[in-house]
């Protein structure tokens, strides 16, 4: 293995922090107040677009012609520092991983920077790949994965992916990556290992290398 890709939201920090829930609220507000979608349709459309396209943004681009940058700035305007703090356990674990480390997120670069800074781990990642890496096409579409691997210069078979999304891991496995699911619930056959928190990654790697 040469590299390891980490998802950001609900992967490097637990969903109980409710940060991503704040983003969902901002998405609903954007759809209602900026796009002008009727209130009764907003939540259902948000969920449908997320299911169909990987992110709500793609549905809004395709069906409503929204400006992607305006959307990203609006929905990520949440109190990151008020919901996340330094995670010493996570920092120690990441520091122990003897692979090239990168963040691969469907969010924005600025949001990723704020999250990593609040967690105290920003200096531990070589690269941050956001929703722009494949012209706003998100995971689980294969194209952003290809772009990330190409930029890193790494073969998929030499890369691990750490995610809370099963669908995003399905694509990773189909491309040849090792897959690590973070969180509870069923473990599909395309997931190699399931862990409770990203800080457990070194324990998973121990079966292949010293860490």
Image (cartoon, rainbow, N blue to C red):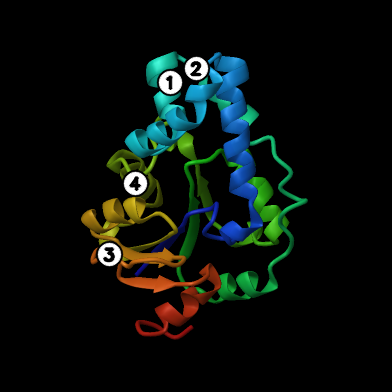
Q: Which mark is residue 188?
A: 3
The residue singled out by tag 1 in the image is 61
User: Of helix, strand and loop, which one carries label 1?
Assistant: helix
Q: Give the answer, above or below, for where 106 lies relative to 184.
A: above
Between label 3 and label 4, give the one nearer the viewer: 3
User: Of helix, strand and loop, which one carries label 4?
Assistant: helix
Determine the CA span between mark 4 and mark 1. 21 Å
Which residue sits at x=58%, y=61%? 14
Question: Toward the viewer: 79 or 145?
Answer: 79
Q: Which mark is residue 166?
A: none
Between label 2 and label 3, give the one nearer the viewer: 3
User: Of helix, strand and loop, which one carries label 2?
Assistant: loop
Residue 176 position by quadrant? bottom left
The residue singled out by tag 4 in the image is 145
Crowd tier of the residue under label 1, counting other residues whose Cα lies within 10 Å: few below 14, some 14–19, many 20 or above: some
Which mark sits nearer the N-terminus, 2 or 3? 2
Residue 123 position by quadrant? bottom right
Residue 34 % position (x, y):
60, 16
The residue singled out by tag 2 in the image is 66
Which mark sits nearer the N-terminus, 4 or 1? 1
| 172 lies left or right of 61 | left
Determine the CA span between mark 2 and mark 3. 35 Å
Q: Give the answer, above or below, for where 149 lies relative to 123.
A: above
Between label 4 and label 2, give the one nearer the viewer: 2
Question: Toward the viewer: 142 or 146?
Answer: 142
Question: Can residue 189 be seen?
Answer: yes
Farthest residue in the front direction? 40
């Amino acid at each position: 293995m040469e590299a390891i890709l980490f998802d950001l939201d609900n992967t490097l920090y637990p969903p109980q922090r409710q940060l991503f829930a704040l983003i969902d609220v901002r998405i609903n507000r954007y759809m209602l107040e900026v796009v002008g979608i009727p209130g009764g349709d907003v939540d259902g459309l948000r969920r449908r677009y997320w299911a169909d396209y990987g992110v709500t943004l793609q549905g809004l681009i395709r069906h409503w012609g929204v400006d992607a940058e305006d959307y990203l700035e609006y929905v990520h305007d949440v109190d990151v520092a008020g919901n996340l703090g330094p995670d010493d356990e996570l920092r120690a674990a990441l520091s122990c991983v003897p692979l090239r480390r990168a963040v691969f997120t469907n969010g924005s670069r600025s949001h990723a920077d704020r999250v990593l800074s609040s967690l105290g781990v920003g200096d531990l990642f070589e690269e941050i790949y956001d929703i722009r890496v494949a012209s706003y096409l998100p995971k689980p579409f294969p194209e952003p994965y290809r772009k990330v691997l190409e930029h890193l210069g790494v073969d998929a078979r030499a890369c691990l992916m750490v995610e809370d999304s099963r669908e995003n891991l399905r694509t990773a496995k189909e491309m040849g990556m090792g897959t690590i699911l973070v969180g509870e619930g069923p473990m599909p056959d395309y997931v190699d290992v399931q862990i409770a928190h990203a800080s457990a990654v070194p324990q998973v790697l121990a079966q292949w290398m010293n860490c």
